[in-house]
Amino acid sequence: MPDAALLLDKITCTFKSTQGGQSYTAVKEAHVAIAPGEFVSVVGPTGCGKSTLLNVGAGLLSPSSGQVKVFGQVLDGINERAGYMFQGEALLPWRSALDNVTAGLEFAHVPKADAAAQGKVWLKRVGLGGFENRYPHQMSGGMRKRAMLAQTLIRNPDIILMDEPFSALDIQTRQLMENEVLDLWMAQRKAVLFITHDLDEAIAMSDRVVVLSAGPATHPIGDFVIDIPRPRDVAEVRTNARFIELHAAIWDVLREEVLKGYAQQKRA
Amino acid sequence: MRFWQVLILVVIIAAWHFASQNVNFAFFFGKPSDVVQVIWAWFITDGSIYRHLWITLSETVLAFVIGTISGLAFGLWLGLSRGASMLFDPYIKALNSMPRVILAPIFGMWFGLGIWSKVALAVTLVFFIVFFNVYQGVREVSATLLDNARMLGANRKQLLRHVYIPSATSWVFSSLHTSVGLAFVGAVVGEYLGSAAGVGYLILQAEGTLDVNTVFAGIIVLTIFALILDGIVGLVEKRLLVWKPSAGETEKI
């Protein structure tokens, strides 16, 4: 079996409490493997440490124990083969759409003209042709997400990490963007680790859905292969019989965790 | 609205004019017509003010530039280095809370009565404004922006250049109006406390001879130039911060 594109091997993340009280174990012994070209979604109740897991995969956070392997090599520092699409606003507000998209190329010292040409191609690809000179505050939420997508993908990463990238969008924009991401992914087939709290989204887009337990000490408690044929349309696939079956099966596992997570948050 | 604004000015000047018909009042408050005459003489008939204005303005600009650059540099350094900021924290607090105008005599001893003692005084005023803004700005750079830039392959130098500095600069600009004003205050107060030239010196001279009209003329000239400096800052700000959303701005397509 070839090396996984991204392997999170028995990851534990314990955070020191700032007030000198108890430490908090967000993730415990989590094990997730993503094959090259595989689209894996991770779902779990809110606040369960999904983002922590993703940050570990990105190399932004080093785990308390366990290791990350990228195509068989142990990760130390930033995961340079990964692109990360953040949940919040990550565009540099003082750069135009084009300069934001080409930022990664600029950091890698790609010649300016070359970078600008690639940037324009990517802006068109995500439907932002003609908006090169807009600043982030002049764009809508959906447009900013598109720019972030282009910014991430222009570097041609082998692994794409996405942290609830569309959670802030309205449902129509969201479905449009999900389909666009799927199209782009179908063309390039990179390994994707997609974090979401939306089970529909996870099933519609992924090859595999991993369910995390409620925090603290989050770990995977379910792993479902989504055998719905591609290409899929995220809106249409929801009526597919297999979709409904899988949804019921995964929800069965997830529901209890969601309730647990909810109860914990209420107590806290 | 303009009309009413002008009307207020007219009313004040008229009241001043009529009140100053009284000799006692005129001794303490001057006479608008005489004040205008002094200003007229300064600028037109003998043109004596240009040298003084030039000196005051160059002190202001020098102090502003030096204070802003050093404030930016220190702010970035301490903002980025937790150890250094913890080490210097009490001293910075002390320096900031000290009434820095009292440094004027010391600067006078160190730098003489020329422009540099005034520049030094004004720099101490500007520096802290810029410093604290940048310091705060660097510490409050959005973590997502930093993480994103790192994921896009930025090294430490690139993070500084493409994330920290632009972010800090926007904070500097928000303090620019205050710091230009303070540079001007520092220059004038410095002159007032001991100098051989400058608008502050003119005012000091006039005060020595109980020439209230000249004092008022100096105050008016200073006010006008402070407004002009502020306007220039506003223009520069508008040019450089195009990326910044202003409140209530609609999209221009």
Image (cartoon, coloured by chain):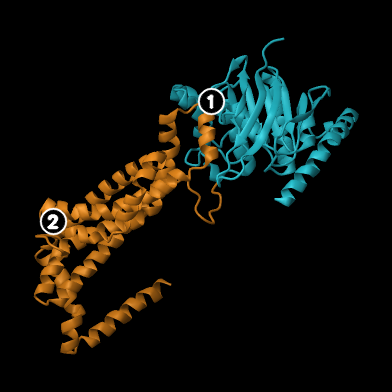
Residue type, label 1 = Ile
Front residue of B90/B201: it is B90
Question: Which residue is painted at 11% across and 60% down in the image?
Answer: B195
Chain under callout 2: B
- Does any portion of residue A128 appear in the rendered image? no
Front residue of B97/A202: it is B97
Chain under callout 1: A
Instruction: Name the residue carrying label 2.
Output: B108
Above-or-below relation of B27 to A16: below
Q: Which numbered dot is residue B175?
A: none
The colour chain A appears in is: cyan
Q: Quick one: label 1, few (<14), some, or many (20+) residues within 10 Å?
A: many
Percent of width and height locating residue A254: 81, 36
Above-or-below relation of B206 to B157: below
Percent of width and height locating residue A207: 77, 23
The outermost residue toward the bottom is: B22
Chain with orange colouring:
B
Instruction: Name the residue carrying label 1.
Output: A78
Question: Which residue is painted at 83% across and 31% down in the image?
Answer: A237
Question: Which residue is painted at 58% across and 18% down in the image?
Answer: A74
Query: Label 2 to label 1, Cα distance in Å?
Result: 53 Å
- Count the marks: 2
Labels 2, 1: one chain: no
Residue type, label 2 = Gly
Q: Quick one: label 2, few (<14), some, or many (20+) residues within 10 Å?
A: many
